[in-house]
Image (tube, coloured by chain):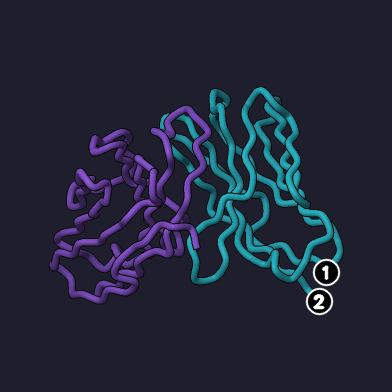
Chain colours: A cyan, B purple
Amino acid sequence: GESVGLHLPTLSVQEGDNSIINCAYSNSASDYFIWYKQESGKGPQFIIDIRSNMDKRQGQRVTVLLNKTVKHLSLQIAATQPGDSAVYFCAYNFNKFYFGSGTKLNVKP
Amino acid sequence: DSGVTQTPKHLITATGQRVTLRCSPRSGDLSVYWYQQSLDQGLQFLIQYYNGEERAKGNILERFSAQQFPDLHSELNLSSLELGDSALYFCASSLGPGTGAPYEQYFGPGTRLTVT
């Protein structure tokens, strides 16, 4: 079956450091990938997306890297801030959406 | 605020009962998605509607059903409730059909369902 997995369930970083959240997926035919952020008590919030014809995309303080060879997706957050503390989901769209179980990011002041 | 509204915010009911969750998409969005989020299952896609028609189906149980009305709001009906149905139910909306196209989904605040 389809699966989207996360390498680490919890990630703790110091404020100001860079964070890297990883994700593995199983369907090599997937064409679109998304990262979502979910803060406690709120719904998921779109962060950044990337199509399968790209290997890197940058946003404000965030970068998504896609390695189709090893079916791996990562989210890099630069200069992590306390407000970045949340659960981060990777997901991909192949006819329907599949979500990972999430990585909890703790930012220590 | 994503612009997607969901009611009720919390719902407590007993096993065997039936409940209806309601979602209003962002203004202009034609697609509505329903998701279930439980502690041990993560975020699971249930079903998607686009402009009133079912577009994609995920892991939705036969006890669950949904529809999208002409005004584009959507309802998720959960019947013969079991303890395991306790979860957060999210609705999301997007401009387009979403399937195979990178239409950003906007999530509502969710409905927390507790089945006792």
Residue matched to label 2: A109
Q: Which residue bears the numbered disc 1?
A: A15
Circles 2, 1 touching at the beta carbon (< 8 Å): yes
Is A109 located above or below residue B109 in the figure?
below
- As drawn, the label of residue B52 is none
Q: Given the image, what chain letter belongs to the residue carrying mark 1?
A: A
- In this view, the residue in front, A25 or A91, is A91
User: Same chain for the residues at labels 2 and 1, yes or no?
Assistant: yes
Q: Quadrant of residue A56?
A: top right
**Circle 2 sits in a helix, a strand or a loop, which is it?**
loop
Q: Secondary structure at mark 1?
A: loop
Where is residue A47 drawn, in percent x and y?
A: 63, 50
Residue nearest the observer in this picture, A14 or A62: A62
- The CA distance from mark 2 to mark 1 is 5 Å
Provide residue B5's location: percent of width, then percent of height: 37, 61
A55 relative to B92 in the view: left or right: right
Is B11 placed above or below A104 here?
below
Image point 68% across, 63% down: which residue?
A: A105
* Residue at horizontal 50 percent and vertical 63 percent from the top: B1
Amino acid type of the residue that numbered disc 2 sits on in the rendered structure = Pro
Give the quadrant of the N terminus of chain A. Answer: top left
> Which of the 4 image quadrants contains residue B114?
bottom left
Observer-nearest of B25 and A6: B25
Residue A103 place in picture, x, y as percent:
63, 58
Give the mark count. 2
Circle nearer the N terminus (2, 1): 1
Q: Quadrant of the C terminus of chain A?
A: bottom right
